[in-house]
Image (cartoon, coloured by chain):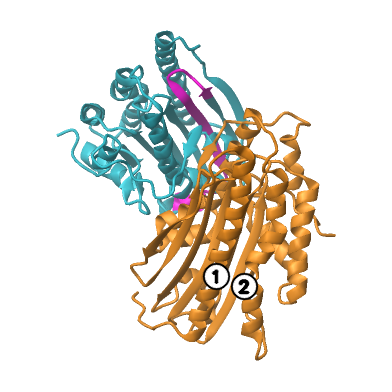
Chain colours: A orange, B cyan
């Protein structure tokens, strides 16, 4: 359905915050990419922008870095879309919004590292308006091929601190939601080591919207505190074909999750979203193997113990 | 649900026919693999069997060839499963079967070639029983990375002859069903160049079952006539990194189709099927690229004209 309503100040403000996150986080990723390139002698790569229009209303800009020294692929997408009627996937989760016009804006990013010791990373912040209702949602999660206790403790402790500073999202609840969401039933394992996932964030009170926007708007700082130290710790670690092959094999799980279960991917595919921006999340190179099992007791086999929900920020 | 009914003679007979197809087609694939290995100096690979039990009732045997000279991965799976109550995915297509116990047996295979000029191939034959009802179904389709008119004409002409010899499945209808089934709406293109797809095959008359079984039982001969000549034509063709990269990229579409749309894959994932046997269909190595478009007018770009339904056996 065509949407005709122009952007209000609030919409502009949130959309602006999402674009700010895109600018800032890309600057941060490019700084890491330059460091890695310098250390390895490879040429550093930059993000390239590509804008798209949505036929039904709205559009977005995907910015993608390809074949980098640190990031084999990194994509950061910002979109703002609207329509005359809330789609089923939204009103089914929030029945009161049914039949209303809607507006949605968000930033989402996926990073696939080159070094198998550097985890893949995903984050997303989103804002919805439907009728008089509005709410924020978001998630951050990390997907290592090799597990290191200190990385995962660091990541979760940073996310816990972030939640506690703002007192809007309860870390434990958001962490458990993330564990449930990024789960592959057919593999009976989590996609990675989790993180946080929240939705329906609409704080009460006159400053509710402002506080929620401040929380969401801190995404760049959170990624710099939670994920980038893990990248820097491992990006120069030597590895061989064995580690590379394991990384490619583990990426198969990422593809399985995104194509079979991910709400955002399925929603995008079914609603004429920009296909390249949606599937930007898929890894550049992936391997599947029949009945593969890592060598018992080896570092690959050890990953399994990290893919079970547990208290990492205790 | 637990199924308790032992196999009847009919079930044994159809299951036996499926296992015979598995034996015969594997012998045929191994012969091609040996030819290719001899020509290229690589060691020929054989199929390795792996049996599995289904917790709810039944089981199967997957036989897989890995890293061959001709077939980078080939898998042929036979299964026979049963249960006390027809699952929704079945009775929704055949409402009269609801609430009855069921039995299903079938053979399915997927081949991913090493040489980018050799198309990937898929075939499946299946038999269902529910209450007093029974029916056969099946499909064969080919997925090239590079299109050659003569290959596709040859493939479709062979399938047309097969259908016409038996006069049970109308080639044109089965061809159109295949075009509709192996389609990626989000890419607005077919998975490959089609083939045939039929279902609900339950011919009338005293010899209906026998005729249907004879039709399905001819699968090995059909593959030898329709697909293997295409393999032999291209398996020694020289290629470089450009062709290999294009093949890996095109395999991404195969993964997208199987994980997002394929009925059998989704049914298997949702019903505790053997995960390795189900995902055996995925290619060994796959590549995704952001906003990739082949060089206009080149042989990669030319593939698009083959991915549109058209009359190949006219």
Q: Is residue A12 left or right of residue A188?
A: left
Is A138 situated above or below A48? below
Residue A276 image position (x, y, % from top left): 42, 54
A16, above or below B63, in the image:
below
Query: In the picture provided, is A35 more to the left or to the right than A107?
Result: right
Given contact means CB atoms under 8 Å apart, are the residues at marks 2 and 1 in contact?
yes
- Alpha carbons under labels 2 and 1: distance apart: 8 Å
Is residue A314 highlighted in magenta? no
Quadrant in the rendering for residue A94: bottom right
Q: Residue at x 72, y 28 (%)?
A: A295
Disc 2 secondary structure class: loop
Q: Are marks 2 and 1 on the same chain?
A: yes
- Judged from this view, the residue extending furthest toward the right is A314
Residue on which disc 2 sits: A217
In the rendering, at what x and y percent does residue A181 appear? Answer: 63, 59
Q: Which residue is mark 1?
A: A20
Q: Tell me the residue at 47%/62% (across/down).
A: A267
């Amino acid at each position: 359905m065509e949407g005709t309503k122009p952007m209000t100040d609030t919409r502009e403000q949130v959309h602006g915050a999402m674009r700010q996150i895109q600018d800032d986080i890309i600057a941060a990723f490019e700084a890491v990419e330059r460091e890695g390139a310098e250390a390895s002698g490879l040429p550093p790569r930059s993000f390239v922008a590509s804008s798209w229009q949505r036929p039904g209303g709205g559009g977005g800009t995907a910015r993608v870095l390809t074949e980098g020294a640190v990031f084999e692929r990194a994509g950061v997408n910002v979109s703002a879309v609207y329509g005359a009627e809330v789609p089923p996937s939204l009103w089914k989760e929030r029945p009161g919004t049914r039949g209303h016009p809607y507006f949605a804006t968000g930033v989402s990013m996926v990073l696939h590292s080159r070094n198998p010791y550097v985890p893949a990373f995903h984050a997303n912040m989103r804002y919805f308006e439907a009728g008089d209702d509005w709410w924020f949602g978001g998630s951050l999660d990390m997907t290592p091929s090799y597990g290191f206790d200190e990385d995962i403790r660091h990541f979760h402790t940073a996310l816990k601190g972030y939640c506690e500073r703002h007192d809007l999202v309860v870390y434990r609840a958001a962490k458990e939601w993330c564990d449930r969401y990024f789960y592959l039933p057919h593999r009976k394992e989590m996609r990675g080591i989790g993180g946080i996932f929240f939705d329906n964030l609409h704080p009460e009170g006159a400053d509710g919207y402002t506080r929620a926007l401040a929380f969401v708007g801190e995404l760049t700082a959170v990624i710099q505190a939670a994920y980038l130290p893990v990248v820097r710790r491992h990006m120069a670690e030597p590895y061989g074909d064995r580690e590379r092959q394991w990384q490619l094999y583990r990426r198969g799980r990422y593809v399985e999750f995104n194509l079979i279960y991910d709400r955002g991917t399925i929603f995008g595919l079914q609603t004429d979203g920009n296909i390249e921006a949606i599937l930007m999340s898929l890894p550049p190179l992936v391997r599947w193997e029949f009945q593969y099992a890592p060598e018992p007791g080896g570092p690959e086999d050890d990953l399994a113990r990290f893919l079970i929900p547990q208290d990492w920020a205790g």
